[in-house]
Image: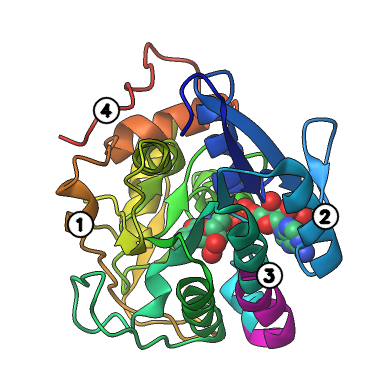
């Protein structure tokens, strides 16, 4: 990086759960100059870009000439990927290759986000170099996207993440907050109890923590020490959706009636426990983990589902 020159980061998919928080984390802070894109939710702050359109991707990257590109655009809904594998491939594989090729023309570092669903969940924890074995179309498309990135980008890294939650515009943006309506409804006087999955273990990870991790990875690249290959980051509190729902009820101060569902009832096959080992990043001093009960209060308050409490986000410093 040239001294005094801003470091241009293109965030592709800035209207999504991860992209929004990352843009908020970087914007207005030296040395970052953030240029962002969205698709259906493009607005005055984000350039409209359909990553399936190669010419549009090339034109965007050639105009912006970024130092780094973060690919946060994807089709991440397992059920949609199952029913529309062509769409999953176009977004999660082909577009990753197109963006990496465009980045190569300018020597940009590319960070592509992947998922714990590349593993089958039978032998946790998973190291970054363990052999993936995805169980569903989403996991397969993301694994193919990892290969597209690592085979194409001259300077590129894949960051695998597990179940995410953070500031939302709609409860259904995250599989954690999507439980809120059922938790609240189950607390009504004559409501039936809500059945919640108690079979699969998840490691809910807070998007502001992910944004810190990505910022720390960008800082390494900015100082000429770019991380390449595969990296993983995960929260460290195991919980089933039943346990997440119970914690949501506590944070919301409602007496929810919840029933644990001990067998998998998903139509789309999902892994049981894909705990991601984060030690590669931890060894570099990268990471931050906000406790779930602290973070979820911030999310609920920001969405107006809970009265404000004296609770501010922690600084972006290495994990405890
Ligand atoms: N959410 C999770 O729990 C989770 C867990 C593990 C890994 N991940 C990974 O993390 C990454 C980010 O996920 P997320 O949860 O932030 O996803 P998200 O909230 O669904 O956001 C998806 C983003 O992709 C954009 N997009 C969709 N179709 C597009 C197209 N044709 N062209 C350009 N942009 C398009 C969306 O733009 P518009 O909304 O403007 O259309 C949006 O900005 C993904 O790679 C996902 O696989 C997510």
Label number found at residue 317: 4
- Per the image, is 255 magenta? no
Query: Pointer 4: residues within 10 angstroms few (<14), some, or many (20+)?
Result: some
> Residue 212 placed where, x, y %?
38, 36
**Marks 1 and 3, the one that precedes in the sequence:** 3
Closer to the eye: label 1 or 4: 1
Closer to the eye: label 2 or 4: 2
Closer to the eye: label 4 or 3: 3
Closer to the eye: label 1 or 2: 2
Query: Pointer 1: residues within 10 angstroms few (<14), some, or many (20+)?
Result: some
The residue indicated by pointer 3 is 98
Closer to the eye: label 1 or 3: 3
Q: Give the quadrant of residue 54.
A: bottom right
The residue indicated by pointer 2 is 59
Q: Residue at x 34, y 43 (%)?
A: 247
Task: Determine whether the residue tagged by mark 3 lies in a helix, strand or loop.
Answer: helix
Q: Residue at x 57, y 75 (%)?
A: 78
**Marks 1 and 4, the one that precedes in the sequence:** 1
Residue at the top extreme of this rendering: 310
Q: Residue at x 28, y 67 (%)?
A: 201
Question: Mark 2 to mark 4: distance in Å?
Answer: 36 Å
Up-down: is 206 above or below 39? Answer: above
- For disc 3, does the CB lie below 8 Å from ligand 1? no
Q: Nearer the viewer, residue 8 or 255?
A: 8
Task: Determine whether the residue tagged by mark 2 lies in a helix, strand or loop.
Answer: helix
Magenta stretch?
Answer: 82-96
Task: Determine whether the residue tagged by mark 4 lies in a helix, strand or loop.
Answer: loop
Question: Mark 4 to mark 3: distance in Å?
Answer: 34 Å
Q: Quadrant of the C terminus?
A: top left
């Amino acid at each position: 990086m040239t001294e005094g020159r801003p470091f241009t980061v293109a965030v592709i998919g800035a209207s999504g759960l991860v992209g929004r928080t990352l843009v908020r984390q970087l914007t207005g802070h030296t040395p970052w100059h953030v240029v962002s894109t969205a698709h259906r939710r493009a607005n005055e702050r984000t350039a409209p870009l359909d990553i399936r359109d190669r010419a549009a991707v090339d034109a965007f990257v050639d105009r912006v000439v970024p130092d780094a590109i973060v690919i946060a655009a994807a089709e991440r809904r397992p059920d949609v990927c199952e029913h529309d594998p062509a769409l999953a491939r176009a977004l999660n594989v082909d577009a990753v290759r197109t963006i990496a090729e465009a980045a190569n023309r300018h020597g940009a570092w590319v960070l592509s986000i992947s998922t714990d669903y590349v593993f089958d969940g039978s032998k946790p924890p998973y190291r970054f170099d363990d052999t993936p074995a995805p169980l569903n179309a989403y996991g397969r498309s993301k694994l193919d996207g990892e290969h597209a990135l690592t085979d194409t980008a001259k300077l590129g890294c894949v960051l695998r993440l597990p179940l995410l939650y953070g500031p939302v515009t709609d409860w259904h943006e995250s599989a954690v907050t999507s439980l809120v309506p059922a938790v609240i409804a189950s607390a009504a006087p004559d409501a039936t109890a809500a059945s919640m999955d108690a079979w699969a273990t998840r490691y809910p990870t807070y998007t502001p923590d992910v944004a810190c991790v990505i910022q720390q990875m960008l800082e390494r690249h900015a100082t000429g020490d770019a991380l390449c290959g595969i990296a993983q980051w995960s929260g460290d509190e195991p919980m089933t959706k039943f346990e997440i729902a119970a914690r949501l009820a506590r944070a919301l101060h409602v007496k929810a009636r919840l029933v644990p569902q001990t067998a998998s009832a998903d139509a789309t096959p999902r892994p049981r426990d894909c705990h991601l080992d984060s030690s590669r990043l931890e060894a570099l001093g990268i990471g931050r983990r906000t406790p779930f009960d602290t973070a979820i209060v911030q999310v609920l308050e920001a969405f107006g589902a809970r009265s404000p409490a004296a609770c501010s986000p922690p600084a972006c410093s290495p994990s405890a």
